[in-house]
Amino acid sequence: MRRVIKKSYLVITALMLVLLAACGEGSGSGSADSKGSSDGPVSAKIGVISYLTGPGAAYGEAITNGFNLALEEVNEKGDVNIELVVEDSAGKQEQALTVSQKLMSDDEIVAILGPTLSTEMNVVAPEADINGISILGTSTTAAGIPQIGDYVFRNSIPESLAIPAALEKAVAAYDVKKVAILYGNDDLFTQSGFDTMKKVAEDMNLEIVTIETFQKGQSDYNAQLTKIKDLQPDLILASALYNEGAVIMGQARKMGIDTPFLGGNGFNSPKVIEIAGEAADGLIVATPWFAEKENSKVQAFVEKYKAKYGMAPDQFAAQAYDALYIYAEALKNAGEADRDAFRDSLAEIKGLEGILGEFSFDKDGDVIMDPTVLIIKDGKFQIFE
Amino acid sequence: MLIEQLINGITLGSIYAIVALGFTLVFGVLGIINMAHGEIFMIGAFIGVVTTSVLGLPLWIAFIAAIGVTAALGYLLERIALRPLRGKQGVSHLAPLISTIGVSIILENLSHHLFGAGNQPFRNAFADIQFQIGSITVYLVQILIFVISIALMLTLSFWLSKTKAGKALRATAENLETASLLGVNTKRTITTTVIIASAMGGIAGILVGMAFNSVNPQMGLSMGLKGLAIIILGGMGNVKGAMAGGLLLGVAETGIVAYGDSGYRDAVAFITIIFILLLRPQGLFGKKTAEAGR
């Protein structure tokens, strides 16, 4: 019996040796490849982690559509030749981590785009930072993400940038003195939005008359709204995802509250109009993405996206589209498919013109950009003046 | 504000009560907790959305359609998930509970697949009819919900205590075999019960859609848990207890939001339930049933 075990160990050891040798050969030929192509376009593989199955699959779909559309254009241009390796995180932290490790262990992959949710990014980003591979979130807006490490970036406008921009304009327009805050207290994203709202409102010396909470999937908001109605605020700050937010607005308008609402990133969706109908009028949001902007690049993107995917692009598609352009630019400037060279040239990016506007990274890898403030009027998002 | 919040609380409480009535009926007869009840309620709400908003049919047809579909689901639930497990040797008494959880998962995912993940608006002119009494606005829907819940409770009480079918049902609840020996068609009695309970879930679903204008595939779960808490509060299997418990929880939750901190809404509501149960372990109205059921 013991002899059999010993023999099998021998066999296993031999097999492993063979495997190791094969691996060595593989990576050797890989690096030779990328060196060989340094005179032509720079070739590289980029890993994508996206939320492709499960309740939030619509986000992942928009994001990968944005990547793919930009990919065609970038490769056609000929400066770089990028190949995307797409993995599904299903919106789960543990799955996001597993697929990210799979991508990181592939030496041919130079950098990673994604994952979709801030909660996933909080798990994946430290791992990427340890492994020395750049990671850029296109939809991760929670506070503190680019600060995780030197290799962590994002191109999505954080709430800390969007909410002050929107609030400043709203205060100026409606002469706001008193605000009520309403937020979902069982979600990291809406909680972080609430923290920002509260801080900004305090900084601007606004009186917060009440802070009310609700939970995901709740259907009755009448108690909170009756209380708010009684306190007569000039503006209601709502840190909610559009699904709950739209229902809240519907019930508020029905109750006779005409006060304008101000929402965060999660509230910014054409779906609000679809669900709440007329009641959605008066919602103010700050967004990097406005599809009706009079800009040839923006309009070309909207046309192409509609033709290819049969629907209008949302901010997730737009942010993903710009992110791939940012990566392409970084790869071109790096001149080789090397993870560290790529990170350095990525951090250098300044004033890149995209469909969201002029884009730069700050020293942490966070966004420097002016958001557009929009309001829903007559059942349509319009620029808020 | 006090009166307005009270109306909000009673509306919410009446809906809780209708959901709880469905739970309590099935529990009273079969002694099991029907975990799929919340999801049947959700399907009822979706049928309401589809008939009024998508097909543009009048509200009363929506009610009939919802009752019809949920009653059919109740029949299938009994036929597929409950009956095969009943009276078999070696089947754990928890097995029907697990099979109803299975049904609830299937229903939730089915509606997710059919209607999408988001909220569906329930647009209806009827939901906008309102009265102005002084500074207070009252909606016809709110009154309707309260009236329907009271009417359902009275009808059920009457049906259970005065009619022959009700007697058969109580006999079945007391002891299935004895009732069967005494000539009660227990199979039919049980099926009827599950169907009626499910149809009541469907009615509650439409009422929620009208009152709050929001219907989504996840709404069944939270409503189901509340319904469960209410029947424990009111006394398992007790119709009046379900009604009183529902109203109590609805008003308590609204009161906490109105005069306290909305973040503690569920916590305070459930702590209240724990206290009541410490004082009255059998629930508010649960004395008789608690003895008879065991």
Image (cartoon, helix red, strand yellow):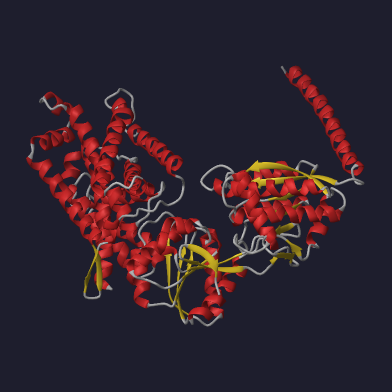
Pick whichever, A284 or A179, lies toward us: A284
Q: Nearer the viewer, residue B271 or B269?
A: B269
Q: Which quadrant of the view contains residue B291?
A: top left
Looking at the picture, how far across and down is residue B281, in whole percent? 24, 51
The residue under the point 39% across, 62% down is A250
From the viewer's perspective, tell me whether residue B272 is left or right of residue A116.
left
Residue A341 can be seen, yes or no: no
B125 is higher (above) or lower (below) than A223: above
Nearer-the-camera pick, A303 or B277 = A303
Left or right position of B90 against A111: left
Residue under the image location 39 percent in, 66 percent down: B262
Q: Quadrant of the N terminus of chain A?
A: top right
Residue B211: image quadrant is bottom left
Question: x and y percent of residue A44 in the render?
Answer: 81, 45
Residue B249: % across, % down: 28, 58
Q: Nearer the viewer, residue B202 or B77?
A: B202
Looking at the rendering, in which quadrant would you find the C terminus of chain A?
Answer: bottom right
Q: For the point 59% across and 46% down, which residue is it?
A: A61
Q: Is residue A300 visible?
A: yes
Side of B44 where A138 appears, left or right: right
Q: Is residue B58 above or below residue A262?
A: above
User: Residue A128: x and y, percent?
Assistant: 73, 51
Q: How many marks?
A: 0
